[in-house]
Each structure stands twice: as structure tokens, then as C-alpha cells.
Amino acid sequence: MTDRRSRFESGSIAWFLQRVTAVVLLFTLGFHFLWLHFVNHAAEVTLWGSALRMDRFVYFIMIVVFLVTAAYHGLNGIYNALLNHGLSGRRRTVVFWLLTIAGTVLVIQGIRIAVAMAGVIS
Amino acid sequence: MGAPYDRGLIEDFGRFRYFSAGMWAWVLHKVTGWVLIGYLFAHIAVLSTAIPAASDPEAIAAGTDLYTRTIQGLEGIFLVRVLEVGLLAAAVFHMTNGIRLLLVDLGIGLEREAEGFYVSVAVTAVITVLSIPVFLPPEVVPW
């Protein structure tokens, strides 16, 4: 009898994407903390300053990539943790769709914010 | 195989005394993951003030727009600054332990799990302590 401790299958697409997003987040989350807390300081944040950063195309793309990978990695992580705790059947389907909807709303709202900030300059 | 023995809630929680380093790493990775995704939702909610604020150029120029006032108002609260240090600690631990997990997936360091966990904790502690002057400068400390 095999000793299956995790239902998060090694080698699956979800497993692979969790690792790919982890690598992306190492850079984007690290940059975010460094840039917005140590180089610039959160207490000195203004909308004009945020808009100037967001107006740069590379920064805008990086923030959107950060948002999408963080939302996927975080919510997929929660889903897999719940699977490992025995979530199954109808509850599994409901949780999957709740997390998918929450993630979609989060990403859409985040992109709306980024577009609004970038729009301040132009 | 028989059914798993139900130890009861209290005894279940009491088992933390017998955790190995790898089990602590697993628990802390989960806890910090929950903290970070919870924060992401709160962060996006706060930053959403930029959407209505963006249509008020006079207030933006004066630095009195809703977004600027909200962020600077929150940053003026001592508890928020302390929570930011905690957030940094959660992020650094999740990242350093995540690097360890990625290396294990590549077949590196599986037999040195405990050492990897201790390195993650040490790096987290050093970066967190060094960040305290940045997050908690004298002007925000209430005493």
C-alpha cells in the first residue's frame, strides 16, 4: 500500500505552475518590498509618486505579472492545502469556484488600480 | 490498515512538542502563506482608493487626494508599522523556505531538511531585525 501524504500530485500542471509562480514571485515580491519600503518609503507614498512609477511600461507590466502570479500562487496554495486536509466532492467544487472567482476579482481590481494610476500622468 | 486513532482536539494540538524541523517548516510555510494572501486582498482594497482619487487633479497636485491621505494615514498608525514588520518577516520566511522547497524538488538538500529550515529562520530573523529602523523610525514610536 502506498503512503500518500499529499493529494497535491507531484508532476501535475497545478504543481508545476505553483513552482513557476514561486520563482517569479521571488523576484517580483523581493523587488516590491525593496523598492517600496527600503528605497522609497511607504509613509511618503503619494498618488503622484505612484502614478509616475506606474506610467513606466516596464514597471506596469511587472506589477501586473506580480499581481497575477501572487493571486494564482496564493489561492492555488490555499486550494491545495484544503485538498490535503481532506476537501473532496461537492465542497471541493464549491471551494474551487469560490477561489477562482475571488482570484479573478482580485486581478481585475488590481489592473483597474494600475490603469487608474497610469492614467493620472496622461 | 485500521482507522486512524482519534486523539481528540487538545491532544492533537499538544503534538507540536514532538514536531521535527521539517514539520515546523511545513506549518510555518502554510501560516505565512495564509497571512500573505490575506494581506494581498487587504492591500488591493486599500489601493482601490486610487480609482476615485485619480479623477481629482487638484487634490493630487496638493497631495490631499483620497489615496495619499489613506496611505499616509495608515502609515501614521504605530500598530500598522509593527504589522508591516510582521508582514516582512512572513514574506522573508515564506521566500527563503520556498527556495529550500524548490531545491528539494530539484533533488538538492532533501537529507538536510533541518539545516535548511534553520537557515530560513536565521535569515528571516536577521532581515527582520535589520528592517526595524526602516519601519519603526523614532518619530512613529509613541514613547
Image (cartoon, rainbow, N blue to C red):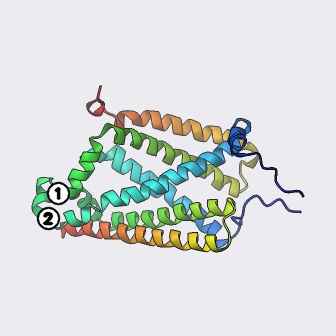
Q: Earlier in the sequence, mark 2 or mark 1?
A: 2
Q: Residue at x 24, y 60 (%)?
A: A52
**Front-lying residue, B53 or B117:** B53
| Front position in the image: B6 or B127 | B6
Place residue B76 in its image quadrant. top left
Residue A38 sits above or below residue A6 on the image: above
Residue B132, disc: none
Q: Amino acid at mark 2?
A: Asp
Give the Cα separation between the discs numbered 2 and 1.
Answer: 7 Å
Q: Amino acid at mark 1?
A: Asp
Question: Residue at 46% of width from left, 67% of height from top?
Answer: A68
SS for callout 1? loop
The residue labelled by disc 2 is B56
On residue B65, the disc is 1
Query: With B41 as the anchor, is A49 left or right in this view?
Result: left
- Answer above or below: position of A51 versus B110: below
**Quarter containing the C terminus of chain B:** top left
For mark 2, does the 10 Å Cα neighbourhood hold few (<14), some (14 to 19), or many (20 or more) residues? some
Chain for disc number 1: B
